[in-house]
Image: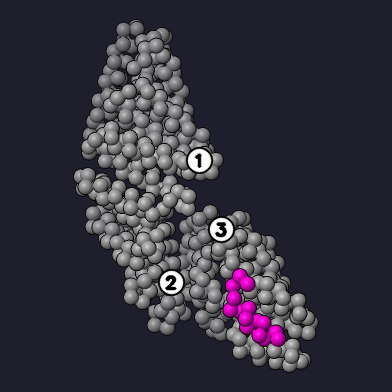
């Protein structure tokens, strides 16, 4: 079979090395002895290839030199090995520099090696090279043509399984099944998530039939970690409780092998994953207990992820701890957990500078801002809100509209919320104007077709800002009322009652109140009729016992409209 690949993904180097590196030196020597005609040529090429096998960057030039001296027709196996070795070097080099360029070169070299190592004469070597090509395609998918390259990787791995059957090559069969599982996990990020995640699980389960804890403990632990992460992802779409329980159990299974003493890095990675699973589980069951288990897991990870050895991992675990403490603060209703949250985020931020880790820097600033905002509800409102604003502004130095449009919009939306709260304390008109400006920036990204919920919420917030401004500014009262009506109507167009009943009620109430206020300026009767209609619609669905404060506001406005309307007849 001739493999043609048009060129996309990272994988565990240990597994990659075992698959890619090729035949051992002794095997090469035996092959050379059978093929080369003169002792002098044999010794020269054996020495050159052996040296190249043990090099990294320099090896590429070494292999190129060897390939100049090798006649493909006379010495095909030496040529094939040199091409495979060259490919290995390009692949390894792609992990540090010029990723796309070096992966593409690796694939071309593997293709040339496959002209020698075909499925009929060299099935085992053919299968190993195809496994390497699959890994290249998976890595390439992380750069461009995601779906296309992942589908090519799937095709390649399925071809490998025709060679590496469970009966003849059980270990390679299991490795291929694990690789297929990982490709389907990647594919789930862009298409048919549940379907592809379940396919991933099937492949991981197939791999576990061979890679048992007793025979292949390392591989068993790796697959259990993959299964755990797959169940955790599925839990975002269905059966949240059941799938998270399965995820937690799988991570625990992996930890039976990945102990802190024998596998410190893998232990830390699993503790991080376990902590994330417990944090998600806390949203549906035993909140406080699971959040505390989450924090404990992240702290276990920090036993290995020290500042000195793993600064990035350290900062991300600290970030996770900060998120857990912030969530815990919602349930324990005190500010001590928020202080711990901010402290954890700040410790993480101290490690990551903006130049080397711009995205992590921005993420941490957003998290710090969220904690300060929450802290403002307990004490020092204005001070903590201004600290939140500062952190959001720091994030925007990275989250620009051009480079990170969605993050930019989310941050602008949050800034708008801060200014809205501040407007209730001081400089109301100024802060409302700033809130409006931020919400309008968010709408540059939050279009109704792609971000329906965010579009509706942002428009709803704008309507509320303009309604409030209309009460504060007599000079521009009518203009602000009309803008409140316009934003409410645009939001309502994309917010039917079945999507979000509460938001539907609020939007109708905004329109009812806006038309009631407009009736004081002109067209009294017509505007009162509109006001009564919208408020009546809002009151149909909002329950007094659930939202007593808002119910009374809506009911009061409705009664005014109704009373004023009677006077028009």
In the image, residue 23 sits, relative to residue 159, either above or below, namely: below
Looking at this view, is 562 or 204 the one in front? Answer: 204
Dot 3 and dot 2 residues touching (CB under 8 Å)? no
Q: Is residue 297 above or below residue 516?
A: below
Q: Quadrant of the C terminus?
A: top left
Kindly state the secondary structure of the residue where label 1 is placed: loop
State the residue at coordinates (39%, 11%).
475
When asked about the image quadrant of residue 254, the answer is bottom left
Closer to us: 499 or 350 = 350
**Which comes before the other along the chain, label 1 or label 2?**
2
* Range of magenta residues: 44-58
Q: Nearer the viewer, residue 372 or 240?
A: 372
**Within 10 angstroms of label 1, few (less than 14), some, or many (20 or more) residues?**
some
- Gap between marks 3 and 1, in whole Å? 22 Å
Residue placed most toward the observer, 554 or 367: 367
Badge 2 element: helix
How would you rate the neighbour count of disc 2 (Cα within 10 Å): few for under 14, some for 14-19, many for 20 or more? many
Q: Which mark is residue 222?
A: 2
Q: Is residue 240 among the parts visible in the rendering?
A: no
Q: Which residue is mark 1?
A: 400
Position of residue 231 measured from the top left corner of the image (x, y, whole percent): 41, 62
* Residue 555: image tag: none
- State how far apart marks 3 and 2 are (Cα): 21 Å
Secondary structure, mark 3, is loop
How crowded pointer 3 is (Cα within 10 Å; few <14, some 14-19, many 20+) is rated as some
Q: CA distance from mark 1 to mark 2?
A: 37 Å
**Residue 57 belongs to magenta span:** yes
Residue at (49, 37) in percent of width and height? 446
Q: Is residue 167 above or below residue 437?
A: below
- Residue at the spot of label 3: 142
| Among numbered discs 3 and 2, the one appearing first in the sequence | 3
Q: Quadrant of the N terminus?
A: bottom right
């Amino acid at each position: 079979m001739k493999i043609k690949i048009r060129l996309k993904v990272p994988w565990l180097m240990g597994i990659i090395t075992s698959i890619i590196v090729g035949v051992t030196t002794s095997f090469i020597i035996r092959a050379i002895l059978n093929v080369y005609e003169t002792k002098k040529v044999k010794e020269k090429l054996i020495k050159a290839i052996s040296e190249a096998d043990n090099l990294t960057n320099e090896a590429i030039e070494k292999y190129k030199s060897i390939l100049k001296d090798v006649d493909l027709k006379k010495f095909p196996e030496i040529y094939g090995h040199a091409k495979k070795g060259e490919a290995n070097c390009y692949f390894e080099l792609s992990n540090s520099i010029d990723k796309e360029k070096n992966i593409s070169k690796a694939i071309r070299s593997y293709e040339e090696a496959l002209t020698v190592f075909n499925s009929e004469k060299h099935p085992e070597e053919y299968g190993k090279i195809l496994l390497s090509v699959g890994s290249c395609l998976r890595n390439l998918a992380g750069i461009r043509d995601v779906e296309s390259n992942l589908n090519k990787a799937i095709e390649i791995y399925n071809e490998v399984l025709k060679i590496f059957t469970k009966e003849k090559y059980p270990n390679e069969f299991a490795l291929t099944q694990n690789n297929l599982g990982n490709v389907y996990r990647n594919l789930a990020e862009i298409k048919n998530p549940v379907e592809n995640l379940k396919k991933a699980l099937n492949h991981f389960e197939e791999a576990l039939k061979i890679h048992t804890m007793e025979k292949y403990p390392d591989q068993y632990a790796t697959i259990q970690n993959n299964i755990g992460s797959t169940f955790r992802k599925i839990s975002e779409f269905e059966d949240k409780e059941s799938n998270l329980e399965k995820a937690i159990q799988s991570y625990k299974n992996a930890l039976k092998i990945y102990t802190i003493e024998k596998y410190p890095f893998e232990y830390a990675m699993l503790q991080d994953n376990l902590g994330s699973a417990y944090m998600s589980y806390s949203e549906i069951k035993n909140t406080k207990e699971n959040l505390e288990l989450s924090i404990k897991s992240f702290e276990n990870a920090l036993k290995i992820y020290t500042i000195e050895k793993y600064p990035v991992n350290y900062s991300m675990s600290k970030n996770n701890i900060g998120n857990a403490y912030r969530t815990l603060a919602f349930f324990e209703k005190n500010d001590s957990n928020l202080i711990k949250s901010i402290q954890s985020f700040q410790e993480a931020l101290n490690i990551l500078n903006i130049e080397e880790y711009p995205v992590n820097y921005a993420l941490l600033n957003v998290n710090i801002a969220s904690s300060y905002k929450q802290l403002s509800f307990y004490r020092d409102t204005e001070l903590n809100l201004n600290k939140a604003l500062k952190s959001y502004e720091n994030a925007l130095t990275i989250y620009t509209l051009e480079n990170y449009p969605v993050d930019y919009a989310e941050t602008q939306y949050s800034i708008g919320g801060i200014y809205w709260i501040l407007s209730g304390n001081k400089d109301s008109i100024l802060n409302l104007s700033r809130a409006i400006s931020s919400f309008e920036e968010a709408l540059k990204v939050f279009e109704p077709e792609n971000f329906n919920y965010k579009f509706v919420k942002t428009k709803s917030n704008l309507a509320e800002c303009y309604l409030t401004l209309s009460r504060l500014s007599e000079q521009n009262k009518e203009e602000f009322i009309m803008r409140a009506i316009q934003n409410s109507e645009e939001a309502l167009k994309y917010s039917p009652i079945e999507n979000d009943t509460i938001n539907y009620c609020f939007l109708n109430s905004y329109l009812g109140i806006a038309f009631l206020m407009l009736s004081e300026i002109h067209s009294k009767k017509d505007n009162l009729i509109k006001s009564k209609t919208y408020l009546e619609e809002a009151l149909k669905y909002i329950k007094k016992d659930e939202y007593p404060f808002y119910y009374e506001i809506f009911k009061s406005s409705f009664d005014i409209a109704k009373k004023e309307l009677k006077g028009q007849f």
